[in-house]
Image (spheres, rainbow, N blue to C red):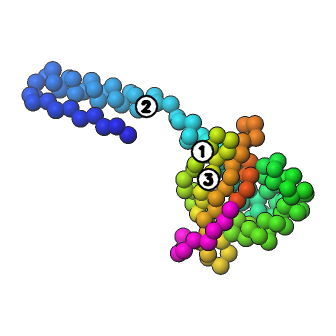
Amino acid sequence: MKTLVLFLRSNSVSSMLAIAFVCLSLASLVLVAPVEAGDETDDAIQDTILSQIEAFANDDKDAAWAFASDGIKRQSGSVDTFYNMVKLSYQPVYKAASIEFLERIPHSDFHIQVVRLKGPQGKRWRAIYRMERDGSEWRIGGVALKEAPGTI
């Protein structure tokens, strides 16, 4: 964010009017500034991840499957295989107790979303989500987990 500083040496009416004009002009720019596409992308990616974690929490296999990318679906072969793989090998995602979104790293064909979460037994994990665009939707193309020190 850039900051504008004005130094005026007199207290004349014209100086005060100039200050008021600059302040109003800057305020109007802030009020009409467009929302950055990054904010919408952040929201969409985070909603996808949260929705899949919620589906796992509700044991909704089909909903969890719906957020997986086509590549994950091909690799898994079926809803049941996918669900059992997550349940057995990705317990911190399957039974996440708390979630904190960290940085998102855009790439030309995909984005990486870093997530800090608390899994079973209170262990803290760092999850690296590979997010892939599927038309207007985001899908989860993979997750790498690493145990992190401390607690959330």
Residue 139 - label:
none
Q: Is residue 38 left or right of residue 130?
A: left
Q: Is residue 2 left or right of residue 67?
A: left
Q: Residue shown at 60%/44% (left/top)?
A: 106
Query: Which residues, given as a range, are shown in magenta?
Result: 144-152
Element type at marker 1? strand
Mark 2 against mark 3, which lies toward the viewer? Answer: 3
In the figure, residue 14 lies in which quadrant?
Answer: top left
- Residue 108, horizontal then vertical, whole percent: 64, 40
- Residue 126, horizontal then vertical, whole percent: 60, 65
Q: Is residue 114 magenta?
A: no
Mark 1 against mark 3, which lies toward the viewer? Answer: 1
Which badge, 2 or 3, comes first in the chain's sequence? 2
Q: Amino acid at mark 3?
A: Gln
Which badge, 1 or 3, comes first in the chain's sequence? 1
Q: Residue shown at 83%/63% (left/top)?
A: 83
Q: Is residue 40 left or right of residue 134?
A: left
Q: Is residue 25 left or right of residue 51?
A: left
Q: Mark 3 = which residue? A: 113
Q: Is residue 25 visible?
A: yes
- Pointers 2 and 3 in contact (C-beta within 8 Å): no
Residue 106 - label:
1
Camera-side residue of 131 and 99: 131
Q: Amino acid at mark 1?
A: Pro
Q: Residue shown at 85%/56% (left/top)?
A: 75
Q: Residues within 10 Å of mark 3 (few under 14, many from 20)?
A: many
